Amino acid sequence: MGFLLPKKLFGIIGYPLGHSLSPLLHNWGFSRTGIEAVYMSWPLQPEKIEDFMNGLRCLPISGASVTIPHKLSVRKFIDMETERATSAGAVNTLYWDGEKLVGDNTDVAGCYTPLMPYRDKIENALILGAGGAARAAVSGLKILKIKNISITNRTAEKAEKLAEEFNITKVEWDDRGKTKYDLIINSTPLGMSGERVTLCPMLMENIDENTIVYDLVYNPLKTVLLHEAEKRGATTISGLEMFLHQGLEQFRIWTGKELDPAEARKLLLEQLK
Ligand code: NAP
C-alpha cells in the first residue's frame, strides 16, 4: 500500500505560534474543495527568518501565512509587494506569481469586511493601539471611506507617527473615553486570555446602543471589552471575524476558491469552545 502525498505545501510562520487556528481553517478548506494540499505550523524564531526565506525559494512551498514577529522582516526577502501590503506596511501572506515571490496583506480586508454592513452608520471611529493590527485597521477604514478616524496609544509617539502617516487624528490615551464615537476598534492585546484577560482597553462612559465595538482580540471570544459594551447595548464584533476573513482571503489567493464564511465560522467556533 503506497502513501498519498499532498501535491502542494503551505504553512504559517510566527513565534511563538501557540494554538494558531490557521492550520485548521486551511486544511479544512483543502478537504472541502478537493485540493491535494497540506498546511503546516512552522514556529520560526526571529533570527531564522532569512534562512527560512532562502529555504522557501528552493523547497516546493506554494505559499505561507506570516504572523508576529515576522510581518515586517519578511518584506526584505520578497520580489514584489501588493499595494495593500505597502499601505498596511506589513506582509501576512506569501504567494508565487510565476517566479516572483509576492508579499500581500489580507489583514486589511479581514479587518474591514465585518464592518461593511455597518458602513453607513459610521462617521467617526477610534482605534486603540498603534501596532501592526492598528495599521491594518486604519487602512481598512480608509478603504471604507470613514470620514473621521482617530487613533490613541499608550505610547503617544507611535500614535502620532501613524496619525501623521495616514492623515488621521491623534487622541491622548487618557482622553480616549471623552468623546462619543460610532465605532471603537481595539487593536491592543488587553483582554486576551492569560494575564491580560480581565483588562478593558476602553473607558466606557460614552458607549451606548449607537456604538459599534469591534475587538480584534478573539481569544476569549467575548472579551471584557465586548462584555462591557454589550451591557451598554452596543453592537459588538469579535476578533474572530477578522481572523476568519483574513484567512478566507488567503485561501482565495492561493487556490482561487471561495469558502463559505458561515461554515468556516462554525468550524472555528467549535474549536474555540
Ligand atoms: P503589536 O504590533 O505588538 O501592537 C500592540 C499594541 O498594543 C501597541 O500599540 C501597544 O502599545 C499596545 N499595548 C500593548 N500592551 C498594552 C497595555 N498593557 N496597555 C495599553 N496598550 C498596550 O501587536 P499587533 O500585531 O498590532 O496585535 C495586537 C492585537 O491584535 C493582538 O494581541 C491580537 O489579539 C489582535 N490581532 C487580531 C487579529 C485577528 O485576526 N483577529 C490579527 C492581528 C492581531 P505600546 O506602543 O505602548 O507598546
Image (cartoon, rainbow, N blue to C red):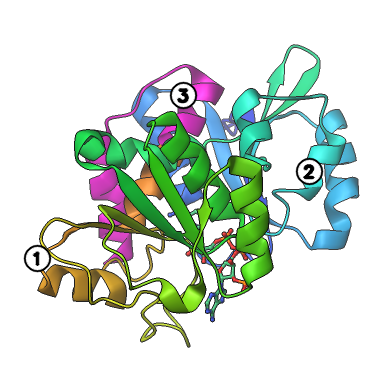
- Residue density around tag 3, few if under 14, some if 14–19, many if 20 or more, within 10 Å: few
**Residue denoted by label 2:** 74
Left or right: residue 18 compared with residue 25: right
In the picture, measured across the screen, residue 107 lies left or right of residue 68, that is: left
The kind of residue on which mark 2 rests is Val
Q: Secondary structure at mark 3?
A: helix
For the point 26% across and 43% down, the residue is 122
For marks 2 and 1, give the CA distance.
Answer: 42 Å
Q: Position of residue 71 (x, y in %)?
A: 69, 49
Circle 2 or circle 3, nearest the eye: 2
The residue stretch that appears in magenta: 248-273
Identify the image quadrant of residue 235. Answer: bottom left
**Residue where numbered disc 1 is placed:** 233
**Residue at figure coordinates x 32%, y 60% from the top left:** 271
Quick one: 130 or 236, which is closer to the camera?
130
**Amino acid type of the residue that numbered disc 1 sits on in the rendered structure:** Gly
198, 233: nearer the viewer: 233
Question: Looking at the picture, how far across and down is residue 113, in whole percent?
Answer: 34, 36
Q: Are marks 2 and 1 in contact (CB under 8 Å)?
A: no
Q: Image quadrant of residue 204?
A: bottom left
Q: Is residue 148 magenta?
A: no
Horizontal and vertical percent position of residue 210: 13, 55
Q: Amino acid at mark 3?
A: Arg
Q: Is residue 84 left or right of residue 219?
A: right
SS at mark 2 in the image: helix
